[in-house]
Amino acid sequence: MSINFYLIDNFLFFLFISHFMDGRLVEMIKGIPKENMHFVLRLLTPLEREVFESLLRQKVAVSVYDIIKDLTERYISSLFWTIFRLETLGLVKTASLNPWEIRVHTRRDSKMISFVEPVELFSDTFFPGKTYVPLDKFASAVNEYFPKIGSAKSETEAVKYKKELLRQFFPFPSYRRIEKILNEFVTANLVISRKGSGGKEKVLYAVNPEYLPYLLKEPEKAAKETSELKKREQAFENEKLNRERSSTPHSP
């Protein structure tokens, strides 16, 4: 019987890694060949993976705030899809075509309610992962924060309200927590950092170009996520267009 030493070496490697997983990424990735760097993504915690995936989506070096903004957009897009899905099932009725003017009104008389109570959120994320909330709580949070987001006087204020909305459903990470994760990536050499231009000289982060080709060895997943997001956005736009057409009086 032949022995596959490559599989044994990899098994021993991951056994070694799992034994010493204490949060120090430097120790985790030490000695990993470049061609196996994509396995590092599987060693990250759910939140670390979300932050790293956000970096992989970027085409330029970004700040901590940029990562936070990207994550809020990803999660808010997921909420819009949930609203669209619930309305398709006849469980909620929205009162506007303008996204931030949407008000969710639950239909408790629907026969479908037992199939989605509680409501499943963020099933397409690493962090927080599948999250379940009562339908009434979901509607209440959306109705409270969508107007605040829509009337925000700046992008910073809008991001603030988006984070407050998301924290109704899960502990959205703080600025310091994300900054700590990014600095751990820098220490582990997965990410490089540099001073940005401008008066405040923000620290900017980017995936280490040396490892980038190997860390993108799972392009199918990233492409699938992007495709799904585009499909959701297109479905939402199509639904808006259909409503606008149906509400426009026809000329005699």
Image: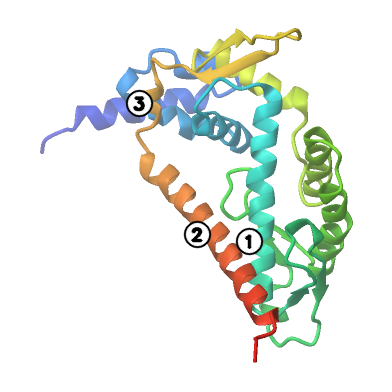
Among numbered discs 3 and 1, the one appearing first in the sequence: 1
**Count of labels shown?**
3
Residue type at mark 2?
Lys
Mark 1 neighbour density, 10 Å: few (under 14) some (14–19) many (20 or more) = many
For discs 3 and 2, the disc positioned in front in the rendered view: 2
Can you give x and y, in whole percent of width and height, for residue 30 in the image? 44, 13
Can you give x and y, in whole percent of width and height, for residue 13 in the image? 37, 24
Q: In this view, does 57 lie above or below 78?
A: above
Choose between 72 and 173: the one closer to the eye. Answer: 72
Mark 2 neighbour density, 10 Å: few (under 14) some (14–19) many (20 or more) = few
Tag 1–tag 2 contact (CB < 8 Å): no
Can you give x and y, in whole percent of width and height, for residue 228 in the image? 49, 55
Distance between the alpha carbons at the discs numbered 3 and 2: 28 Å
Q: Is residue 251 above or below residue 226?
A: below
Distance between the alpha carbons at the discs numbered 1 and 2: 10 Å
For the C terminus, give its image quadrant: bottom right
Residue type at mark 3?
Tyr
What residue would you read off at disc 1?
81
Image point (64%, 52%), residue name: 77
Q: Which colour scheme is used?
A: rainbow
Choose between 168 and 148: the one closer to the eye. Answer: 148
- Residue 7's disc is none
Image point (65%, 68%), residue name: 84
For discs 3 and 1, the disc positioned in front in the rendered view: 1
What residue would you read off at disc 2?
231
Can you give x and y, in whole percent of width and height, for residue 28 in the image? 49, 19
- Residue 214's disc is 3
Among numbered discs 3 and 2, the one appearing first in the sequence: 3
